[in-house]
Amino acid sequence: MIKGRFDDENLKWIPVLIIVVFLFPFLLKSATFSYKYYLYILNIAGIYIILTVGLDILSGFTGLMSLGHAAFLAIGAYTSAILVDQVGLPFELSLIITPIIVGLFGFVIGFPALRIEGMYLGLTTMGFGFIVKRLIIAFREWTGGSGGLHVSKATFFGITINNDWDNYFMIYTFAILAIIIARRIVKSKLGRAFMAIRDSEQAAQASGINLAKYKMMSFFISGMFAGFAGVLFAHTSHFISTDHFDILLSILFIVMVLVGGVGSIYGAVLGTLFIVLMENMFIPLFEDGMSQFVHLEAGDFQVFIFGLIMLIFIIFQPLGLYGMWLKMRIYWKIFPFNPRKRFN
Amino acid sequence: MKRIVSIIIMTAFIWMGCENKSTSPGVSDTEILIGNIQDLSGPIKELGLLIPAGTNMYLDYINSQGGVHGRQIKMLVEDHGYNPQKAVVAAKKLIEKDQVFCLYNVIGTSPAEAIRPILEESGVPLIAPATNSSSMSDMSRQAAEYIFHTDAGYDLQTRVLIDYIIDKNPDAKIGIAYQDDDYGENALKGCAEAEGNHGITVQKESFQRGATDFVGQTMNFMKGGCTDVIIGGIVREPVTIMKTAQAIGYKAQFYGLGPTVDARVGMLAGEAGEGFIAAYWANYPNSDDSGPTLYRQLSEQNNVPEKMRGLYHYYGFATAHVLVEGLRKAGKYPTRERLMKGLETLHDWDSGVFPPITYSRNDHAGVESVILLQLQGGKQVAITDWRD
């Protein structure tokens, strides 16, 4: 009900957001001498935003579960590293070709989605993740095996993207583009077909929606977003290794979408920022203090907190961070005529 | 003319008397901050506890004697969970936020490889990366000038073990169980070298990091008729393979690479581990050399539990010697450049914990020889001299 009311979004604040995003590094630089570290964290968040926005199209809008998005990210990263550093393609071309290749992988994974759903699809995509990891190790001549692969810096139309400062502007330009494109997709006929499939496959089919076509399209699009994120990941972190693209990362992407609010593009953005900042900045702050009361090892504390956050959101706030924001907005819009029960 | 000459001489004396008092970040009047990145939550988290504990034991000892040039050494430890990406985040945090003077002991090959671009960008040296991989001392690689490796490579260790086996028995059929990662790849490099030297073929069986079942690999070695088996694992792998071999009645001589020298291998394997030979590249913890003697003395003083003592705790203690010596060489007003230049002046430096170490501008390899230790009655005994 809340969602329906605000479907026609107000786009006036988008230019303001863009200005804030691009002014932020300057503010950060003037505020702290360790701004490079914070920029790096934000850069990771920016790359993951591109991926989770795509994951939300698949899981939030089409209702298809994926535990293989870390593998899509890996394919994107390795493909671009090979295309640029070994084949000699320009980075700009890799930005176009790699997402298509990863999208095709998504297309292939979409096949089983025609017959299986829910947990079983999750397991299938998880299996895909394991296979990709083994394949990367097996093709060690190109991928460097489990030892990892050093990747060159991105050169964008003659400009070499040298450091975290440059990376920030490149990543967030693409992240904003990804958000706009994703918004356009979910508002189009394609997006409506995805949502129809999510709500009821039978009803969607009865309305003339080709399930096979749209499910595979959803996987293809989601794969493309992940592939794009993979390209940026490889050329901004300069080193990729199979150790990073594990099942835990796939689960973390799901948590990001879930915490942000399933089925809303802005939710995926908020959820990703929230989780990445929690993981790298806030949890370490509390870790030492908490360890006096609860005996948990370093990594366990993080898993504990993420588990807790997820439970709290699922039980008390299933619409996620974006849902909270929408509720707040409606509350103030109709204040003081708020029907009490509606906002419990 | 006299006046000009005297002015020149005076200026020269003043210039010589002036020491450059500028220091790098991480250095205050009383303290030097060091950054360490360990695995505190991943597949080798037990090492993440032991290694920094060993380092801190030695640093506390140095600090109690007044520190280095009057400064106390303080170490910050970050976690990477054996994830290279997290290692990059940790390195950025230590360098940019905590402003450490240098990095030390980053554990794991891929995490250490991942931070090469950061070392190059920031100019921060990495002392004693905690991996035996020889890629760390490959001077042709990125940021090699900032990395000072201590450990002898897995490739050298494997080659020396195969040379030893063939010396003893030219007809030996050798097998190697290797971890399917960078550790194993480096070991296989040495294996290929030895295969070429001796004209032999080694039977290779892989396993995944963190594996707990080795029945398949052990059966394959038995089927292949291997008389000598090298295990490129840490602690669980040699123990499980030797126990499995005992259970299925397979008799072979077992060998291990550096990480298997840990005392727990003997304790856990019991009878099955008797006679196990491992390659090691430092003065082993039980020896009478000055380093191990100090180690045992400090361990007693600090009441270090018996189960903590051993290879990894000792590793932290031993590599800290290189760090401290580097800081001494960096002088009263240390900068990162002076630290690197200071280490590069070490020539046949006898630390007491390692065989003599030499670093130079083109050689950051540290120890380049190994000694073979055998478990005899549950104790490690050296059975060879240093070999390379």
Image (cartoon, grey):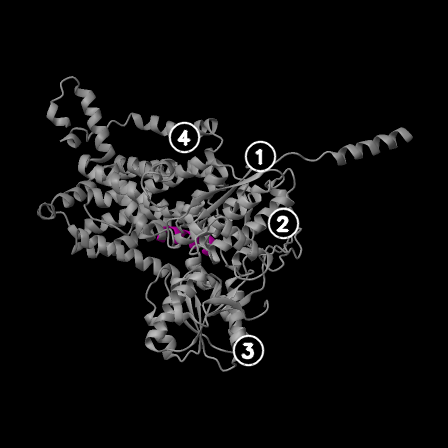
When asked about the image quadrant of residue A170, the answer is top left
Residue B334 seen anywhere in this rendered image of the structure? yes
Q: A146 or B32, which lies in front?
A: B32
According to the picture, the residue beneath numbered tag 2 turns out to be B343
Sooner in the amino-acid sequence: mark 2 or mark 3: 3
CA neighbours of label 4 inside 10 A, class few (<14), some (14 to 19), many (20+): some
CA neighbours of label 3 inside 10 A, class few (<14), some (14 to 19), many (20+): few
* Dot 1 and dot 3 within a common chain: yes
CB atoms of marks 4 and 3 within 8 Å = no
Badge 1 element? loop
Numbered mark located on residue B167 in the image = 3
Specify whether A136 is left or right of B168: left
Q: How many marks?
A: 4
Report the span colored magenta: A75-87
CB atoms of marks 1 and 2 within 8 Å = no
CA neighbours of label 2 inside 10 A, class few (<14), some (14 to 19), many (20+): many
Q: Residue at x 13, y 31 (%)?
A: A1
Specify whether B346 is left or right of A293: right
According to the picture, the residue beneath numbered tag 1 turns out to be B30
- Circle 3 chain: B
